[in-house]
Image (cartoon, helix red, strand yellow):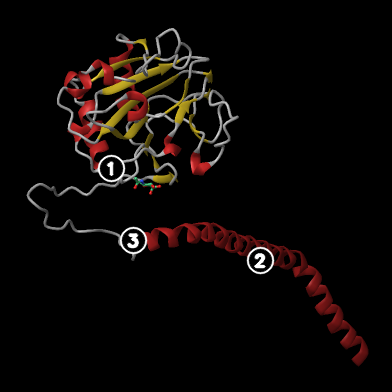
Amino acid sequence: MKNSRGGKIAVGYGGGCRSVGLPLVFLLCLFFFLAGFFASTLFYQPDEWSVQSQLRPRVLAAMGEERSSFDPLPHGLSGDNSLTSIPFQVLSWKPRALYFPNFATVEQCQSIINMAKSGLKPSSLALRPGETEESTKGIRTSSGMFISASEDKSGTLALIEEKIAKVTMIPRNHGEEFNVLRYEIGQRYQSHYDAFNPTEYGPQKSQRVASFLLYLSDVEEGGETMFPLENGMNTDASNDYRNCFGLKVKPRRGDGLLFYSLFPNGTIDLASLHGSCPVIRGEKWVATKWIRDQEQGNLFFDSQNRKD
Ligand SMILES: *[C@@H]1O[C@H](CO)[C@@H](O)[C@H](O)[C@H]1NC(C)=O
């Protein structure tokens, strides 16, 4: 009886077990599934955070402390109130090169291309003594045109110029006119310096300090801006500078590239040698602003110095 009762109880329990078994197992399954699911998201998130935490210290280190906002300081008579956020990446120290993502809008780029389209002519070179157009054929095969901000009634070029002046802290009137260039398939510009070495070009009234390239289009393939001597590499004289190597910057519409041709002491930085790799697919449009160490009266209309 005891046994059978015990058995009965056991059976009763067992039977109870069986009768609630399925929902219970289901609930347990659901519980472990959900627990596992949330645990996995917990494990996943720290991964994402660790990526951020790798980036954040650099930002923090650069800022000194984290600031969500900044109240503008009382500014000097020649300053202004506006806070500007213009992100940039240091591409290289040799030469000193910065990259500015989204420096101009798609609309601004398109309007500059439209302005330039009708005035394109084959690009020319500043010739060294003894060079002729024939002897330098093939070095630079793009088409281009010069346009000054004052010729652009829409004000786009003035805005871009203003922004370039801010990131370089070199006043607008040190800039030459914009040189807008188009490279079609196969077109390129062999490596060269933007600065004029007086031993090759004779004494200079002013020198190009820096160059700002605003990419007006994406290029499907090729068309990179290259710095073959970046960080002192490839200085082996056997390298053919018509080839495409070294630090290569792929054009992206709206992005800007700034590099300095001169050291702070005014001598030419040999690592600023650069060129345009041939376009393989697509078309490359770029607006170049050369920035000089002297104010630009009508100096840049001096055709001898109007080397594109
Ligand atoms: C100018 O600066 C560069 C880079 O710091 C240096 O290598 C060079 O010797 C300097 N030239 C003169 C003439 O001081």
Q: Which one is in front, 167 or 81? A: 167
Q: In this view, does 43 lie above or below 168?
A: below
- As helix, strand or loop, the secondary structure at mark 1 comes to helix
Question: Quadrant of the image for the N terminus?
Answer: bottom right
Residue 74 is left or right of residue 42, and the answer is left
Q: Which one is in front, 258 or 273? A: 273
**For the point 36% across and 14% down, which residue is it?**
124
User: x%, y% of residue 144?
Assistant: 35, 15
The residue type indicated by label 1 comes to: Val
Question: Quadrant of the image for the C terminus?
Answer: top left
User: x%, y% of residue 135?
Assistant: 45, 10
- As helix, strand or loop, the secondary structure at mark 3 comes to helix
Tell me, for residue 167, which label it has, or none: 1
Q: Distance between the residues labelled 1 and 2?
A: 57 Å
**For the point 30% across and 62% down, which residue is it?**
67
Tell me, for residue 75, which label it has, or none: none
Q: In this view, does 142 lie above or below 199?
A: above
Tell me, for residue 31, which label it has, or none: 2
Tell me, for residue 63, which label it has, or none: 3
Which callout, 2 or 3, points at the residue further toward the start of the chain?
Answer: 2
Q: Distance between the residues labelled 3 and 1?
A: 18 Å
Q: Do the residues labelled 2 and 3 touch (CB within 8 Å)?
A: no
